[in-house]
Structures are given as C-alpha cells and as structure tokens.
C-alpha cells in the first residue's frame, strides 16, 4: 500500500508500472533540491533522457514525462565510486525513499518523494561509452565537457553537444514533440554497437510464454528482448533468453497481425513470464508480463 507521503517502496514501484505525468509544480523545487544536495558533495551531474529533452527543446518539463532523470559518469569530472554512497544517504536525510541497484554498467537509484520520482544514475564507462536504456551506447566524450543551460530558473548541465546526445537517444527527429516515441528509440538501438553484456556462466534462461486475446498458446510468435536477441516461440508458446541481470528491458512481440512494444518490463534471470495482449490497446502498456509461479 502506498503511504500518504508518497515516499516509500510501494510508491516507487507503482510509479514504474503506472506512469503518471510529472507535476511540474513539484518537479521544479525537487530538481532544485537535488542540486542543493549534489553540489556540496562535489557531484557534477547532468540532465538526461526526457528531462534533458524537455530542457533543451521546450525549456520545460515534457507534459507526459513521468520522472526527473539525472546522471553522472564515474571517472569523469572528478567522480569516484566512493563518493556515491553519501549521495544516497543525503537524499534519505531529505525524506526520499531510495532504492539502489548496481551492475557493471551503472549504479542507479530510484528515489521517491511526494509521489514524484528522481532517477539518478552513475554510469560506468565501457569501451569509451555509457549505457542508456534500452541498449543504446553513447560516447563518453559527450559528458567530459558538460554544457551549462538555463532551466527552471536555475543553471544546469547537459551533455555536450546536447543535440548529439538527444539524436543518439531519440533519433534525428527529437526536435519534434512526440508522445509515442518508443519506436524511434528502438530504431536507435539498431544503430548502436553490439551489446557488451552477456549472461553469467550457468545463469538460468528466462522464459516468455505468448498467448493471444483468446488466451490460446501462440507458436511461431516473434519475440525480441531489445538489444539482446530475437527468437520464435515453440509449440508450447514459449521462448527463452539469457538475461545478464534483474533489470528493466524493452520487449517487442509480433504474431499474425498483432505487434506490441512493451517498453518497460522488469525481468529476472531464470523466471518465467506470460504475455497476454489487450485487444483495445496496442501501444504504451508497461509492466505487462505476468510472472508465472
């Protein structure tokens, strides 16, 4: 159950599956508060993803964006890994619920306060690039000499040049506001270098079972875990993938005349999931796959 404060674990995980447009009146002071926390700790951070897109293109938060996205790169601008834990402690002291995850690509925190989420990611450099969801690799050089811009009555940093960053993430048409942007992002995955992450040896496979609207098994359905691989379901409606981590992935499912992009699915190595389409919705659903027990 989500608390009245909207600053707990339940509120955080509800925010991932039920995206609500950000409240700009709350987001503006929270962004300022984040800067007040990070600056004294020596963390040179930048606006990323939708927050960067809105700041550069619209000079505002995007009306349908759901969170505040901030980033920093380990090994650039004086950031070392031992500086990160005190950052999360400082946010907790300001009343945020903070959930931290880490792997060889990043150390990331989903932070919730007043039902508003800040996603703060400290990226690791891998082969001169950093990872952006859903498997887009962006040159680290864009974050070495950050650009200062005016935004929300303050001065904030963005990748430099921001246009190159936004093109890498959202494609060449990023300048045009578009609520249904998922396919543009997936098109960028095809242009990025081959994924640099592989499952751990002995890691169990993740299974996805595909059903149609009549809840019948679908054999031969095309299933793609974006950036990792594609496969067709077997006679029992299942397909298997090797996932490197418990993480969010984008999944695309196609069969007959049906296609759906599941832009944000939380998947775990070794787990099994079921996909059931909704005849009335073909785009924009999140956290759709149900885990089989």
Image (cartoon, helix red, strand yellow):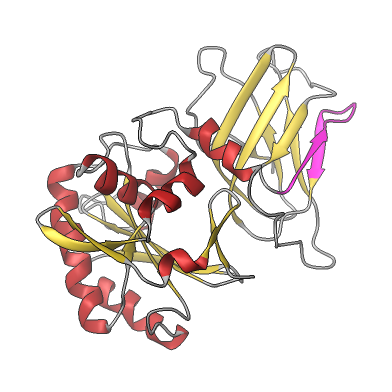
Q: Position of residue 168 (x, y in %)?
A: 50, 48
Q: Can residue 90 be seen at all in this image of the molecule?
A: yes
The span shown in magenta is: 228-240
Which of 187 and 16 lies nearest the eye of the viewer? 187
- Rendered-image quadrant of the C terminus: top right
Q: Can residue 101 be seen at all in this image of the molecule?
A: no
State yes or no: residue 204 in magenta: no
Q: Is residue 155 above or below residue 179?
A: below
Residue located farthest toward the right when viewing the structure as drawn: 235
**Residue drawn at point x = 44 percent, y = 64 percent:** 142
Q: Position of residue 1 (x, y in %)?
A: 35, 47
Q: How many marks?
A: 0
State yes or no: residue 232 in magenta: yes
Q: Position of residue 178 (x, y in %)?
A: 38, 28
Which of 186 and 30 lies nearest the eye of the viewer? 186
**Residue drawn at point x = 47 percent, y = 77 percent:** 74
Residue located farthest toward the bottom when viewing the structure as drawn: 82
**Left or right of 168 on screen, residue 268:** right
Q: Position of residue 270 (x, y in %)?
A: 75, 54
**Residue drawn at point x = 90 percent, y = 26 percent:** 235
Which of 5 and 241 lies nearest the eye of the viewer? 241
Which of 38 and 47 lies nearest the eye of the viewer? 47
**Left or right of 284 on screen, residue 19:** left
């Amino acid at each position: 159950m989500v608390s009245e404060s909207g600053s707990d674990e339940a509120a955080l995980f509800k925010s991932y599956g039920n995206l609500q447009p950000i409240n700009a009146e709350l987001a503006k002071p929270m962004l300022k508060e984040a800067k007040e926390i990070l600056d004294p700790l020596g963390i040179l951070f930048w606006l990323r993803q939708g927050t960067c897109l809105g700041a550069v293109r619209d000079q505002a938060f995007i009306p349908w964006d759901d969170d505040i996205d901030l980033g920093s790169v380990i090994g650039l601008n004086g950031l070392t890994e031992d500086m990160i834990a005190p950052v999360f402690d400082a946010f907790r002291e300001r009343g945020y619920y903070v959930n931290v995850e880490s792997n060889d690509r990043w150390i990331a925190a989903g932070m919730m306060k007043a039902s508003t989420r800040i996603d703060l990611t400290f990226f690791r450099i891998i082969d001169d690039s950093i990872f952006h969801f859903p498997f887009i690799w962006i040159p680290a050089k864009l974050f070495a000499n950050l650009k200062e811009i005016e935004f929300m009555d303050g001065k904030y940093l963005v990748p430099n040049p921001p246009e190159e960053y936004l093109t890498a993430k959202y494609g060449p048409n990023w300048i045009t506001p578009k609520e249904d942007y998922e396919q543009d992002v997936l098109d960028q995955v095809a242009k990025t270098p081959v994924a640099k992450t592989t499952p751990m040896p002995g890691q169990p496979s993740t299974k996805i079972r595909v059903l149609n609207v009549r809840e019948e098994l679908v054999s031969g359905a095309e299933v793609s875990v974006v950036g990792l691989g594609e496969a067709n379901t077997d006679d029992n409606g299942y397909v298997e993938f090797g996932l490197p981590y418990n993480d969010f992935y984008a999944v695309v499912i196609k069969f007959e005349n049906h296609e759906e992009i599941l832009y944000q699915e939380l998947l775990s190595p070794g787990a099994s999931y079921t996909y059931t389409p909704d005849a009335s919705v073909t785009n924009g659903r999140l956290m759709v796959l149900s885990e089989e027990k």
